Amino acid sequence: MIKGVSSAPTKASLSPNKASAKDALILKKLSLEVSVLNSNLKELPNIDSHITVLLDEAVHALAVKPDGVYVDGTFGRGGHSRKILEKLGSHGRLIAFDRDLKAIESSITINDQRFTMVHSHFAGMQVKLAEMGIFQVDGILLDLGISSPQIDEASRGFSFRYDAPLDMRMDQSGGQTAAEFIAATTEQQLAEVIKNYGEERFAKQIARAVIAERNDGRAITTTGQLAKVVAGAVTRFEPGQNPATRTFQALRIHVNQELEELTLAMPQCLALLAPQGRLAVISFHSLEDRIVKQFVRSQANRDDLPANFPVRAVDLPQPKLKSVGKSIKPSSKEVKCNPRSRSAVLRVAERTYVA
Ligand SMILES: C[S@@+](CC[C@H](N)C(=O)[O-])C[C@H]1O[C@@H](n2cnc3c(N)ncnc32)[C@H](O)[C@@H]1O
């Protein structure tokens, strides 16, 4: 039985043998209602659950030392955090960050002295850790993007599947909502956001349609309104994909400054990692993955120097990171169980001894 839903009388409990014609009718209606209720419940997502992506692979990549200090920069619903805690000994520590107050709220289910939850964006991690007297850590995990509860809770405004206020902020304690951004932006800036963050070829047409709607006195304040305007402007899209998919992704990335956050966090991770400390990052689209890949590469190889640079290889600055293995993608079994994992890519790097 589904928690919180009491069961309706069954055919057996009403004893059909003794039932009158009236009882039989009631019985028929009840069983119909129960089956409708059950099918509705099956369709409704549990809006507070998140299936952790690449759980074993990401925690394994951290090579957790029992007494080490670890950072989970994206707590979500704590799937990775819990697994890290399982691997830590009694002197280990885990500091988790999330900018979403609902994620912070959900962390109270972890009652563990080794665990500290911080409400902050991860680009603030070095400052927040310093405030706690932590200047070096043994591993950092970033599982980027949004969590299932954020997508599935209609009122967060991330999804075109529900009509709701166009919010899209991960941290609802401040900042500009997507509706506020659309109300204030120019057509050119909007087109750039949609093109650069959504890789949408109809970015110009969409921006024109959105601004025309706004200038006609119809402010775009809901997900439904935006999805409708975008659908009218996009003439071709991938089969099975909502025409507004790329525009919604772009606005979400812009509103939450997701790429700026990642760009600011990468050098902080490098500065915080102890020798042999591990960095594990799970990205969900090529824009994020490119930032991670290029940062690791820039710290791992000296390929930014010209080939005929007049210095011996041994005299060159030595790499501060080394890439660990190849990028890891979810297995077909994981994608089947959790289709939202399909675009995930895990990259792992290790801090060298070079100061
Ligand atoms: C994919 S979910 C993480 C899921 C988590 N690993 C789990 O197993 O439950 C991403 C989470 O990171 C948070 N997040 C995304 N970007 C962030 C940032 N720049 N700073 C802090 N938290 C961020 C989101 O609010 C969301 O809760």
Image (tube, rainbow, N blue to C red):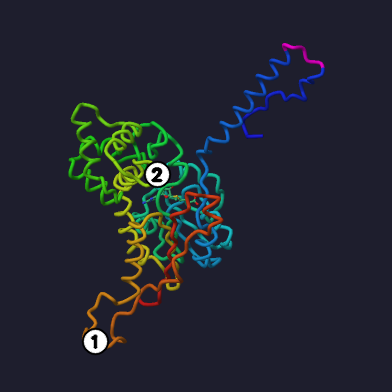
Q: How many marks?
A: 2
| Mark 2 surroundings within 10 Å by alpha-carbon count, few (fewer than 14), some (14 through 19), many (20 or more) | few
Q: CA distance from mark 2 to mark 1?
A: 53 Å
Sequence-wise first label, 2 or 1: 2
Q: Is residue 88 above or below residue 200?
A: below
The residue closer to the viewer here, 160 or 172, is: 160
Q: Position of residue 97 (x, y in %)?
A: 42, 52
- Quarter of the figure that contains the C terminus: bottom left
Which residue lies under the disc numbered 2?
Answer: 241
Q: Is residue 138 above or below residue 112?
A: below
The residue closer to the viewer here, 208 or 347, is: 208
Q: Position of residue 74 (x, y in %)?
A: 43, 52
Residue in the picture at 54% in, 55% down: 334
* CB contact under 8 Å: marks 2 and 1: no
| Mark 1 surroundings within 10 Å by alpha-carbon count, few (fewer than 14), some (14 through 19), many (20 or more) | few
Q: Position of residue 167 (x, y in %)?
A: 34, 37
Which residue lies under the disc numbered 1?
Answer: 311
Main secondary structure of the magenta stretch: loop
Residue in the picture at 36% in, 63% down: 292
Does the magenta portion include 321? no
Q: Is residue 344 above or below residue 226?
A: below
The residue closer to the viewer here, 262 or 121, is: 262
Bounds of the magenta segment: 18-22
Q: At numbered mark 2, what does the secondary structure look like: helix, strand or loop?
A: loop
Amino acid under label 2?
Gln
Q: Position of residue 174 (x, y in %)?
A: 32, 40
Q: At numbered mark 1, what does the secondary structure look like: helix, strand or loop?
A: loop
